[in-house]
Image (tube, rainbow, N blue to C red):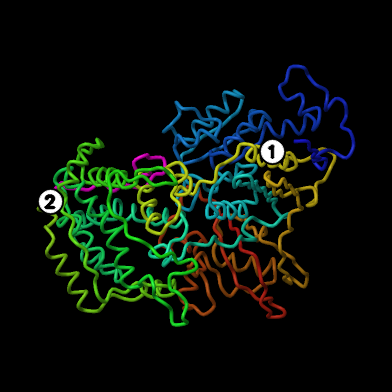
Amino acid sequence: INGFFYFDADECLPNSPLPLADVAPTGKSRYDSTVAVFGKGAQQKLLDLNYFLIGAGAIGCEMLKNWALMGVACGENGKIHITDMDRIEKSNLSRQFLFRNSDINEFKSATAARAAQTMNSNMNIVSYQEKVGADTEDIFGDDFYDKLSGVCTALDNVEARLYVDQRCLFYRLPMLESGTLGTKGNTQVVIPHVTENYGATRDPPEKSIPVCTLKNFPNQIQHTLQWARDYFEGEFKQSAEDVNSYLSNPDYAASLAGQQNTKIDTVMSIRKTLVDERPVSFEDCVVWARLKFETLFNNQIRQLLYNFPEDQVTSSGTKFWSGSKRCPKPLVFNLNDKCEDAQMRNHFDFIVAAANLRAQMFGIKGRTDEEYFAEVLQNVIVPDFTPQEGVKIASTDAEAKEENSQPIGGDSEELEAKQILESLPRPGELAGFKLNPIEFDKDMDDHMLFVTACSNLRALNYSIPTEDTHRSRAIAGRIIPAIATTTALVTGLVCLELYKIIGTAQKELKIDAYKNGFVNLAIPFMTLSEPTPPAKTKAILKGEELNWTAWDSLDMNMGDITLAEFLQYFETEYNLDVSMISHGVSILFSFFANPKKLEERKKMKMSEVVTSITKKEFPPNQLFIILEIIANDIDTDEEVELPYVKYRFR
């Protein structure tokens, strides 16, 4: 393909040529080419960087490779901290290039760190296997962030990005953010006091599949795969966890009290799993799988058609089964059946996968030989189906939501749940018995065989084209193939911003020098835009206008002073009368509180006030307390809107 694409990043360069001594090659350094462009000073800053890389997936690996070649944290004072709680799976190898077959089941962060050090033995890097969140602030706390130059995210979810964004705001650290979605990629650079933070703007939430579409009216393979995944979770994970909870919790009845809408379903599921359908041999598991086939792909469809016959019309006179509502047909079991689209033996695959998963759940040895299944299935007696009267099936999403939100039917269902619970064998009678809950994993072939067969059978019910296991794995695992070129381009753009963050010689960088990028290699399309500055809030302090942003705080570094000294400081320094001080959800001081209590608190140190009210001690690595205050100007009595107080008590 003939094409021409021009791209430059001349905003990274100094305004005028650097002195020859600063750019002269030594002939001995691997960084001579960088020095020739940016100078020795910039290279030394790269060597001395202390960066926190969160995530060691596709972007994390590529970023670490770039940093090893650039010399990031390869000096005496530099260090990279990398964390990722995941282990390497086979499917990662096609897009996470620091990993090899021999690394499968190893931790991503430790493996990536070793691979990067192979590229540059001078790289100082520490790996962690911890999630970054509120529950790991004992590891990634004040003392940890205090030593960092910046943070780079290589995350796969918005929630984690928002948490890291709040940390960067608090510690005023630059944040390099990027993401890919197939051929699409984006980068965002967050600079303290210069750009808005990541969480200042949000994308709209993803649309979910309506409940009634999933339950009764699918029209795409995505719907049947989601239904199959949900069924897997309920049948092989949730039911086992409910049984284990019943067997291990001496006061299980009391714990059920909070499940008003699902109580009867939970106890019925426990009775089915533990008593009515409990297998003692693999043959029982095969029989169970065959009866499940009949229930899911024949009986339920026939019940649906009984409620809504093929020729049914709505109140407006239109056909009920029209538009996105496909009229289903029940399936007749045939061990040798093969679907046209995916050429898969879904009937046989469903029985094999379901029976083996059931056996695994109960600790029974499974098998897969076809002759055995054919022999057992010949002798299974399948009850005839009789449609039930009075079964309500939601035909719209609104009806489905209403059905789910309705409380259980009063005392009668409460009594029935109690009776079922009392009929179950006592936990003491089953001492040592425990089920194995099975968590769905797209990389486990037996899991995917079940989900694919289950999805395809439902697709055949509704005349939806079926898919093979490979394609189903991608859809069910919500995998959008990561393309190496997109990842490489995105990390390259991020590394250009890193050169700007360390500071260009002879040039003061303003907001227009930084760039957020969006690319789509499929079109092809690439645009770089200037980041948005942070929104400002206006306040009048001591008669002067103060414009503050989300990056700002009132910093206090006076040691652990008393509450009285704290109040006096605001009166003297800002001419403010503080009427309320809060920390999180706890009110530490308020003008309307008991005067006697206030006088006692005023003599206490600020850290003591916090611990006495919250009843929690500070972790040894915590240096700051975040305080929110409400205050009025002493002269005008007007309330002044202030940023939070960042109070250093250690």
Three-letter amino acid code of the residue under disc 1: Gly
The image shows residue 568 at horizontal and vertical percentages of 62, 68
Under tag 1, what secondary structure? helix
The image shows residue 224 at horizontal and vertical percentages of 41, 56
Q: Which contiguous range is marked in magenta? A: 431-448
Q: Quarter holding the N terminus?
A: top right
Residue at numbered disc 2: 430
Q: Is residue 432 magenta?
A: yes
The residue located at (79%, 33%) in the rendering is 38
User: Camera-side residue: 247 or 324?
Assistant: 324
> Residue pushed farthest top?
27
| Residue 8 in sight from this viewpoint | no
Residue at numbered disc 1: 492
- Ranked by sequence position, the earlier of labels 2 and 1 is 2
User: Camera-side residue: 201 or 212?
Assistant: 212
Three-letter amino acid code of the residue under disc 2: Leu
Q: Give residue 320's mark.
A: none
Q: Is residue 8 magenta?
A: no
> Crowding at label 1, few (<14), some or many (≥20) Cα neighbours within 10 Å?
some
The image shows residue 185 at horizontal and vertical percentages of 65, 46
48 to the left or right of 461: right
Under tag 2, what secondary structure? helix
